[in-house]
Amino acid sequence: MNLAAPASPAVARCVEAFTRRFGGTPATVARAPGRVNLVGDHVDYADGVVLPIAIDRDCAVAVRRASDDRWRAWSEDLRSLVELPDPAAHASSPRLVGDRAWANLVTGVLAGFVREGVAVPPLEVAVASDVPIGAGLASSAALGVALATAFADALSAPLFGIPLARLAQEAESQFMGVPCGMMDQLASALGRADHALLIDCRTLDVRSVPFPAPSRAALWVFDPGVHRALADGRYAERRREVEEATRAAGVTSLRDLDESALRAQSAANALRREDLALFGLFMAQSHQSLRDDFAVSTPELDALVDAARSIGERGGVHGARLTGGGFGGCVIVLAEASAEGVPERIAAAFERRCRRRPTWMRVAAGPGASLVPPLRWRGA
């Protein structure tokens, strides 16, 4: 766990929100990043190999033991205060719905600590995030990992790395109704600045892959404004279909049927060599698979990818693909850092086709989850 990670804007907002809502200062503050996936989606739950990066956008959590017998959580971004059930009695508690459903993940993470035999006293929790919600950037995984990182410290319950990621993934699956694999949580927990992660989801082997310096490569995230919630059922439906196809083929996992594992490994090798043109071809293949084989793309995402590809290598664009579970979300574009006007040209081409203007931001490979030392947030 990286204790030296700098405090992000989300941390400052989180601490301020905690003080405003609960008074005083928190005992523990933690942060965890979102992610973009460079190659490989819908294969982490099928023992596949994926290549994500943690991004320099964080979810922050502040926590303190409560002076009364109430578990309460505040979301600064949703302006939502929720009184939580006792996590030790969660099985008999109904799930929250509507604009309070986000807090099910808080209960789920706390329940994970209870399962580990940890006593969980009443807590006050505040959350703030710079990871856009519903944009395919793993905002829920960032929240789950940040919660687990903060609670592990506040409850004096040593937990980090893969076990921490697993606890967060189980909470999202059981309490949010999203049957996700572990890619997002592993990327958020184990991310490394200036590196991608090559993750074998069968063995949980995680290897760092150097990502080109910001002076060489720019990674742009384009949002067409069509967001989605993975808990709406379409993601779960696609997973069921993949599992049914796997059983029908007589193999134990999708990985045994196709070349997605080889693609991710070959893409990682291209990244190590900084062969961005070849890496862009793997991005194109990955998007095509998500569009045609998994049918999780949308017209807007395809239009953004087409707009980026129309610029091509001559214009400084190496590759583009959707990122995340699909059915909405964002597109990532890998471009030469020195290429001028790339996002504006992509946005203009998209607007001509779809009659709307996308938003975009540049992201970089950032560090994984960490506690934030008090000197970095006191007075924030």
Image (spheres, rainbow, N blue to C red):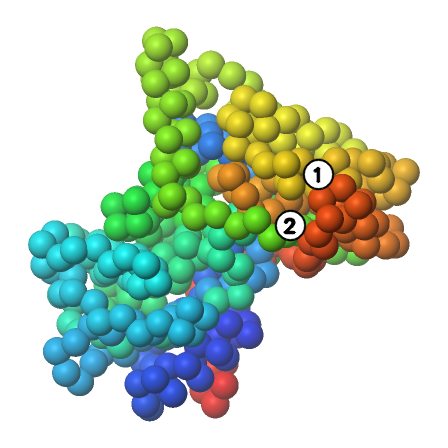
Q: Disc count in the image? A: 2
Vertical arrangement, residue 210 with respect to residue 131, above or below:
above
Q: Which residue is mark 2?
A: 224
What amino acid is at disc 2? Pro
Percent position of residue 336, x then y? 81, 47
Q: Are marks 2 and 1 in contact (CB under 8 Å)?
A: yes
Percent position of residue 41, x then y? 51, 34
Which one is nearer the viewer's eye here, 67 or 78? Answer: 78
Question: What SS does tag 2 mark?
Answer: loop
Vertical arrangement, residue 58 with respect to residue 48, above or below:
below
Q: Quadrant of residue 256?
A: top left
**Residue name at image x 67 percent, y 36 percent:** 302
Q: Give the label on residue 303, or none.
A: 1
**Residue name at image x 60 percent, y 53 percent:** 225
**Residue name at image x 41 percent, y 36 percent:** 234
What amino acid is at disc 1? Ala
